[in-house]
Image (cartoon, rainbow, N blue to C red):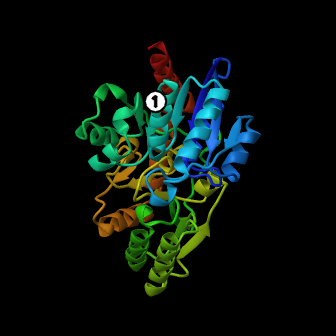
Amino acid sequence: MISILYLSHCGSSIGGGEQQLAYLVTNIDREHYQPLVVCPDDGVFAEHLRRADIPTVILGLPPWRKMKSLMVRHSAAKKLATLAKSHKAQLIHTSDSWFNPYLWHLRKQLEIPVISHVRTLLTPSQVRKYKFGQMDSIITISEQSGTSLTQAGIDTQKINVILNCVDLSVFRPVSVTIPSEKYVVGIVGRVEPFKRQKAFVEIAAKVTAQKKRVKFHIIGAALDTPEHRAYEREVQQLVAKHQLQEVVHFMGHRTDMPKVMQELDLLVTLSAGSVIAEAMAAGKPVIGTPIGSTTEMIVHGVTGYIMSSASTEEIANKIVELVKDPTQSISMGQRARKHAEETFGIETHVQKVEHIYEELLKG
């Protein structure tokens, strides 16, 4: 039995990265691999893992590079090394690349291979700062992320592109033959600048000026930090400015994502991530922008559209086009489900990750 230590970005909530980690550790070959997940805090995600019979440990891992962490990070790293030794870990895999310095520390101490999972786009300075050159293997969720790494000097032999996956048995389409009275457009994710909910409100204003039977759902909540709370207020103020209170609905944090997707007619994402696979598995078309894994997940004109990130007007016009022809929207959603079945299955995803483990452990 091969013991693998996983580092999770969060234990108190479930975002896209946490969901992808859960898919991996709950579907990995348990006759061959024994996962142990380390969460920096307790809560919804840690409890989800425990209910799935995944060994889970809560261990605070302060941000390595922040000044306030200087006095405690080495103590945290020492505790992590002790934990890895006690569980006889033979490989360490972080689900968030910001933990790379901890991996680097463990790699030096324990002389075992380490893997970093990249879920965001990186700049060359971030690649250097977070010691990607010291990783034995790197998994990215898009070719675009892989290109950023190679441009920063990372050996291409270390980089593996594996798209996000989705549970096709949970995210399923609802049979729809008659268009509903209201067309519902949603955006999913934490309310934060990277997810661009303010741009989504601008899109809603432009669509509403042309079509009145469209509703917009903002699904997600802000983290309890001054920066994120301030951004949430800005989004709310923008809704009030455009007088969209009857049109734009703040749905808050939801834990029932399959139901959330069923409530939508169309997903709009202005960032990227596993939510694209979830929507397509639920039989919904997706409009996205050319960032991260989006261009590799959406088949333009078939399962959705890839639009310029700079033009909210172009995205709004495309939404209006789908609202005017709901049968096109429904058929595009059907093609999206078929594509999800062919591309985003959990079994294929896990097998690709296990192959990386096997190659590392050979050496």
Q: Quadrant of the C terminus?
A: top left
The image shows residue 116 at horizontal and vertical percentages of 45, 36
Residue positioned 68% across, 18% down in the render: 31
Q: Residues within 10 Å of mark 1 (few under 14, many from 20)?
A: few
Residue at the outermost top position: 362
The image shows residue 72 at horizontal and vertical percentages of 55, 52
Front one among 203 and 358: 358
Front one among 317 and 118: 118
User: In this picture, is 228 found above or below 30?
Assistant: below
Q: Quadrant of residue 203?
A: bottom left
Number of numbered discs visible in the structure rendering: 1
Residue positioned 43% across, 77% down in the render: 208
Residue positioned 36% across, 38% down in the render: 132
User: In this picture, is 145 found above or below 324?
Assistant: above
User: In this picture, is 161 found above or below 204?
Assistant: above
Q: Is residue 308 left or right of residue 350?
A: left
Q: Secondary structure at mark 1?
A: helix
Residue positioned 50% across, 60% down in the render: 68
Q: Is residue 173 left or right of residue 297?
A: right
User: In this picture, is 147 found above or below 64?
Assistant: above
Front one among 248 and 360: 360
Q: Quadrant of the N terminus?
A: top right
Q: Is residue 24 visible?
A: no
Amino acid tagged 1: Lys
Reading the image, the residue beneath label 1 is: 108
